[in-house]
Amino acid sequence: MKELKERARQLLRTFKEDSYIFGVDCLDRIGEIVSPFGRKSLLITNLGRRSKEDLLSIINSLNKEEVEIAGPVPSAKPNAPKEDVLRLAEEVSRANPDSVLVVAGGSGIDAAKAAVVLSVLEGDIGEYFGVGKVTEKILTTGKELIPVIPVQTASGSAAHLTKYSNITDIQTAQKKLIIDCAIVPPKALFDYRLTKTMSSELTLDGAFDGMAHCLEVFFGASPERFDRTCEIAKNGIELIIAFIQKALEDKEDMESREALGLGTDLGGYAIMVGGTSGPHITSFSLVDILSHGRACAIMSPYYTVFFAPAIQQQLKILSKIYAKYDLVDPKVSKFQGKELAEAMAEGMIRLEKRVGFPTTLKEIPGFSESHIKRAITAAKSPQLETKLKNMPVPLNREMVNKYMRPVLEAAKTGNFGLIKDV
């Protein structure tokens, strides 16, 4: 396992070079990455509720570098509600800082990214959903975004490393995406020791979110990016599978916490090389009944079967990892077509059952046909069109009813037989 971790570190260093500090016990280095951006930083965090000692360490590091702290102001709630983004945008405008330091999990970081966009570029949040809308506004206005420096506190979305900001409209229970290189943090830090305060539920949600990033990008890998994506995905997925149960059994076990941090960070690397697809599209419409990672976990096996004709090579590669951890029979690597996909999907479900996850939508309290209708409607939105096209079996909006609905029906009941081939 030492070799697996070291290769993960090498991949992350290749990805972020000197813009990312990560590892165990590196929190006191935050001052050195914030100070180059100016002498006043707005601190956004809820860390004091989890660990006042860690918050004090951050403040001391900033004071050492003579960085003036505005705040702290409370971070966002889970799923980064639009209302929190608006509140934080006002805080950014009021403080007028040189940088924004957000110490939070993925939702808090996503909200801070979007808040800076609104504070600087103004307008309505809806203007920025989709691909490249922030950059378009920067080019037309000539304005520059205030740097957002994230300190990640949860292994999961890798929001501290990526061009994504997921924002939720609570009234419609629909999540939407800002996708723009302009919001990639210029510097970031993740002390994996901070994840010891994660609950078991959050640990699982984050781990499966990171695994979904690796899986979906690998499934959709283009020929020219296949080898790089394969290495990222294999390392990330094995780290998560190997250590997820150990992390649940002993939350103080730093070997496991570091492994999940590295694995989910590789998920962040993956989504900067390629894009997510089906499970993520559907998860955005389930925010009122499921956490993001749990929604992706439930949907992944069923989309795996749907993608079967296009991902045979990927499944054979991954089958060796799943067999190593007794999730599938070693003979699975010799299977072909839908038989291979269904065997691997059963392996994914077996992992979910090991950690006590639900495996069908019908098991989820509050689930109804309205969620399927909402997911179908959302998938047809132009703002999610990139994810439809990212799928290994690409769909357009006209094909969603015919092919995506059966995948959702299969996820509701657990019946792979409902899934249609394109």
Image (tube, rainbow, N blue to C red):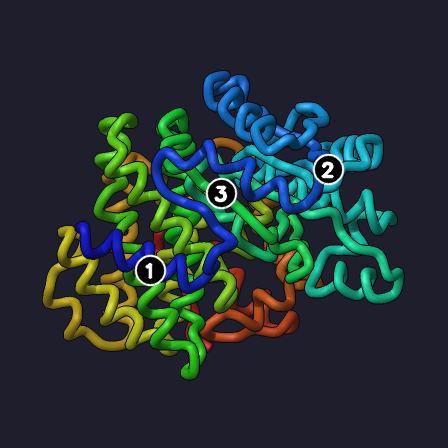
**Label 3 amino acid?**
Leu
Disc marking residue 163: none
- Say which of 204 and 158 sits in front: 158
Residue 385, x across and y down, in percent:
64, 67
Disc marking residue 10: 1
**Res 381 quadrant in image:** bottom right
Q: Nearer the viewer, mark 3 or mark 2?
A: 3
Gap in angstroms between the C-alphas marked 1 and 2 = 35 Å
**Label 2 amino acid?**
Val
Residue 28, x across and y down, in percent:
46, 32
Q: Is residue 277 visible?
A: no
At x 67% / y 40%, what residue is drawn? 112
- Say which of 189 and 388 sits in front: 189
Give neighbour class at mark 2: few <14, some 14-19, many 20+ (Cα, 10 Å). Answer: many
Is 14 rendered above or below residue 123? below
- Say which of 152 and 19 sits in front: 19
Task: From the image, tell me which residue sits under label 3.
Answer: 189
Q: Secondary structure at mark 2?
A: helix
Disc marking residue 85: 2
Gap in angstroms between the C-alphas marked 3 and 2 = 22 Å
